[in-house]
Amino acid sequence: MFERSLVGLDRTRKGALIRMNGVGVCPGDDGVLALDRRWPDHAVALGWFRTHPVAVVFEPENTEEWPGARGWFSQLDGAQTELLSTALQVASWQRDHRFCGRCGHEMRRKPFEFAMVCPSCRFVSFPRISPCIITLITRGDALLLARSPRFSVGRFSTLAGFIEPGETVEAAVRREVMEEVGVRVGEVEYFGSQSWPFPHSLMMGFYGEALSEEITIDGVEIEAADWFYPDQLPGLPPSFSIARALIDNFIEGR
Ligand SMILES: [Zn+2]
């Protein structure tokens, strides 16, 4: 449905358009898509959706109250979610990489690629993607769920964190769990991944088998954590999140 080919698109000045300001996305005729519009000069081509060339346009001066990007994710189908995720990340990359990080010169877009090149020192910048682990730790039938102070009242979720430079994903799972709740993790099994464009995470989902039971929370990133059984679960993350998929899949597979 969404084809990531930019060939020929830089000269296309018309097609579907996603309009956004800092955090909001303008409702279009088809979800987030405004169909068959002329593209302004600062629109950035993203690829092809169904038969339409698609571009995103970032309008920082636009103060209209458009629905927040997070809200769209619960309403859109899978293909439009992928498109919006791409649009959000490309728009924030364009906005945040206008000047060369090495020499400070103004960057130029490389045609047909998501790449910015410095005309002075040839440094190339690509959209930033930050790899994160997200993990459901289990012990028998019990699920280890935790809540961050940022969560809505009563909601618990799986544990997550950024992978550090030089670290493997498996080591990141074990380190994050130890840091956040003090539980030792043995076997780690890959589940799947999800792009999470707030602002540019790639969530890699794992199941982890607990080797210890006692929970010691860090009190900063995590304000509460506990073992839960499937018949007495707390409030859970939304259905479109990989956190929820990890939980649902574990419960169905028992
Ligand atoms: Zn440079």
Image (cartoon, grey):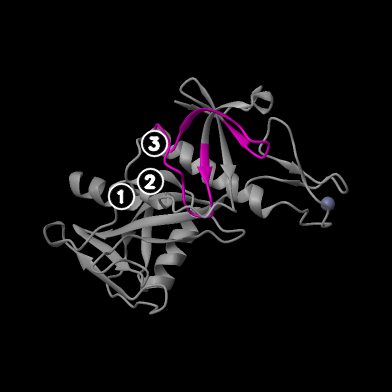
In screen coordinates, is 85 left or right of 58? left
Residue to which mark 1 is pinned: 246
Q: Secondary structure at mark 3?
A: loop
The number of callouts visible is 3
Residue type at the position of mark 2: Trp
Residue 164 placed where, x, y %?
A: 57, 61
Magenta highlight on residue 36:
yes
> For this rendering, which residue is in front, 231 or 121?
121
Determine contact: label 2, label 3, CB under 8 Å.
Answer: yes
Determine contact: label 1, label 2, CB under 8 Å.
Answer: no
Residue to which mark 2 is pinned: 72
Give me the residue at 59% from left, 53% from top.
60
Snapshot quadrant of residue 90: top right
Magenta highlight on residue 98:
no
User: Which residues fall within the magenta stretch?
Assistant: 18-46
Q: Secondary structure at mark 2?
A: helix
Say whether residue 128 is visible: no
Residue type at the position of mark 3: Gly
Give me the residue at 27% from left, 59% from top.
138
Q: In the picture, which quadrant includes the N terminus?
A: top left
Residue to which mark 3 is pinned: 31
Task: Report how far apart the C-alphas of labels 1 and 3 lie in the structure.
Answer: 27 Å
